[in-house]
Image (cartoon, grey):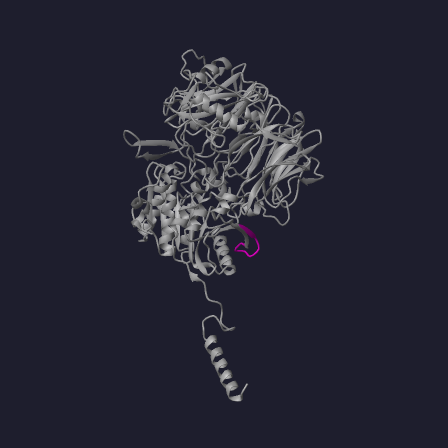
Amino acid sequence: MRPKLARYVLVAAALAVLLFSALPGVRADNPPAAPVPHTKANYELAAAWTPAKVGKLVFELAVTPHWLDTGDRFWYSFENTKGRKFYLVDPVKKTKTYVFDPVKLAAALTAATGLPYDSQHLPITVIRFVKNETTIQFEVNVPRDAVIPGEKKGAALTSDRATDATGSNNQEDDAAAGEPQQLGGRGAGRFAPPPPRDQKQLTFEYELASNRLQLLDERPLRKPAWASVSPDDRIVVFAKNHNLYMMDAANYAKAQKDANDKSIVETQLTTDGVEDFAYGGRGMGGQQQQQQEENTDGGRDNPNARTAVNVSWSRDSKKFALVRRDQRKIPKLWVINALANPRPSLETYPYAMPGEPEAPQSQLEIFDVAAKSRTVVKADAFKDQTIQIESERPTGRAREHDKTEPLWAAPGSDKLYFTRLSRDMHRLDLCVADTATGEVKPLIQERMNVYIESKPVKVIGSGAELIWWSERDGWGHYYLYAADGTLKNQIDRGEFVAEDISDVDERARALYLTASGHEDGENPYYQHFYRANLDGSGMKLLDPGDATHTVSMSDSGKFFVDTWSRVNTLPESALYDSQGANTMPLEKVDGAPLLAAGFQFPEPFKVKADDGITDLYGVMYKPFDFDPAKKYPVIEYVYPGPQTESVQDRFNPRVNQIMMANMGFIMIEIGNRGGNPHRSKWYHTFGYHNLRDYGLADKKAAIEELARRYPFMDIDRVGIWGHSGGGFMTAAAMLIYPDFFKVGWSESGNHENNIYNNTWSEKHNGLKEVTDDQGNVRFEYTIDKNSEIAKNLKGHLMLVTGDIDNNVHPSNTYRLADALIKANKRFDFMILPGQRHAYGPDADYVAWRRADYFARYLLGESDPSIDMWELNREKQDKPAPAQQQGGRGGRRGNQ
């Protein structure tokens, strides 16, 4: 190359380098471009991932075995995108077969009803084996006006009779704040739910060998909600007019067919039952407050209606026991049902508040069936104590036969075990009562300076030994005692929590139990199944795998079904033998349709608590159109506990956080010290005496650590929301850290725990018992309230409550609203007419209003139009006109 040309090339190259290096983000010393704030609310993507939409992509998530009477066989049903199938498993033969041929049954059902069915769309959810397990029965809902060949009067169950047969259809969330509910009345596992108003329910019988289908002339007798049936099926106990009654099996059969049959003979056992000290309804209430009773065979407020009685039976059926609670001195509380017809109605109920001098009084009573006599147990030890009968509910085959009544822990009827707990919950006694005399002997005493918790005692060896659970060493473990209360040895030990007993092999002297936190390197909330020797010599893991496990063991104790799951893994179910050998696979959830639609698994994470030492575990949900070059607002879903922690530890694609994330947020769930009973007693009681603020520092510290770890999280746009205890925590967070939490959505929060129910508040915050020089006992109670710091509010806060919430009374929310008004604070308020603690039919509306609220104040974009197209679209059976589908302002309809 010539020298002059070479000089031109060098100069050009140098200029090119200078120009190129001036471009943004190119020079080596330039930092990477900062993430761009995400500001678009993606309503379409969120609407595509509502729980209802997800329910069309994935169905069953676990195997629920129904153990049969012969051998260790069981049946289960499992639904996926191919339909629901029913399987019969023989663990000994290691076989899994169809219970019936779905093609043949669909054809037979079509011929029998004149309604078309195919093998993918069989309308069967529950089956019952009868006639030595050669035949099954099942229910089918058909149009109410359908003409069914061979149908006779009494063959169908219609909705106007459903209440008589199965109990109230109105189920409310009446547990303590945030406690999970077990829905479904007695017999819910054996019978399909009652039919909708426009349908009737028929019962068919199907012979498995011959494929013969027959419509039954009379529907099988269902167990009414008011009936407590003795183990030998000869006696039924119930309440009426506040008192206790019983009837024999013959009269019970009449009542099952027609509750109002005038020939039914009833025997009255008591005459001293009165309102608020009754043998049914509120007089039998547990520690949580109850809503107004829905009678089950005569309607609301009918004094002659039969109602349920919470009794425990001796295993020989000779006696039963109950705890009657005297609430006559408890002050009343009220809610007004503005939607009641024909005019608004006032609901009145006793409601004990924390620290009040009057508390419910427990009385333990034992009844002799043959003698029709009553013995009042001499159980008094502590002022305002609570009493719990030590019993166990039948499982396995017994439950399949609708036997759900609790059975005494004792093997016979001469002894009754029970616990008594002081009002401050620092003292707990396990006692045994002589059922003939009512005399009491304390066997085991637990004492702590924080609240004491317990699990049911297990009596073994015909009463010679007791297995007892205690947190005396800071962790929940089982201990072996002699019948007289002498400690023999600790069964399991270590820094983990022993959970529930599934079986005791008395011959092998071994215990089968679940436990949390036993496996090193795993999330401590993951449960596993173990075998432990009663002498404390060993503990063996039976279901390995880094996941949480749910177990159902056979009555014989030879086999168990295990389903394991994590938030980021599809669940699997398998059959194991009692030594932990994987006998055969059962099911794996088919996630292909879900993943094909764009589903992305949530991400588990671990951070440090505010103390820098304690590990906290959480889950992160990202939008499915996530862009790592963007910076997203963060919303934390909270529930503080202390009785549970709302952090998903198993696969569940139907949670609301997924819809919310797809709106354009990073959603997180994170534990906090004081929030979970499945860790150490220290962790669980961290919030004792500080029930308002104890978890907030951890919630804030977790987000800060995550934001340092992930640049896509915008620490300047943080929201928080929760329901019940989570609603309380949401408002507290907005007021304690007003510069950090910018937007809060608070639902039905117990903001004023001094007016929430006494049991929950006194237990978790602490109650001081004071005895004066004359021996008189009184109780002192103080607690921090959200209204006291209302002046701190800076961000956007929405308060929501149902107006007839009789769990967390609306006054909790009203008082916070009043304090905010007096502090001259702007805030938002929504009342749900006719709704209690659970929002029922309004829940979807609230979910979308919540998404709107966060979109407006964290993304700066929301949809201001009136109609909520997301809900309208969900409810439509067919596509709406284009202008209606466009919905909010027509924006989407014009795209």
* Most common SS among magenta residues: loop
Which residue sits furthest bottom? 3
Read off the magenta span: 608-617
Q: Left or right of 13: which side holds 172?
A: left
Report the residue at 35% width, 34% height from top.
Answer: 334
Taking depth in this image into account, of 244 and 404 the one nearest to the observer is 404
Question: Where's residue 746, x and y in %?
Answer: 39, 47
Which residue sits furthest front? 1
Taking depth in this image into account, of 109 and 54 the one nearest to the observer is 109
Question: Where's residue 862, x and y in %?
Answer: 34, 52
Q: Where, quadrant-wise, is the N terminus in this rendering?
A: bottom right
Q: Is residue 843 magenta?
A: no
Question: Where's residue 24, x and y in %?
Answer: 45, 71
Question: Where's residue 312, x and y in %?
Answer: 54, 25
- Residue 172 in sight here: yes
Vertical placement of 308 versus 851: above or below? above
Q: Quadrant of residue 879?
A: top left
Q: Left or right of 475: which side holds 731?
A: left
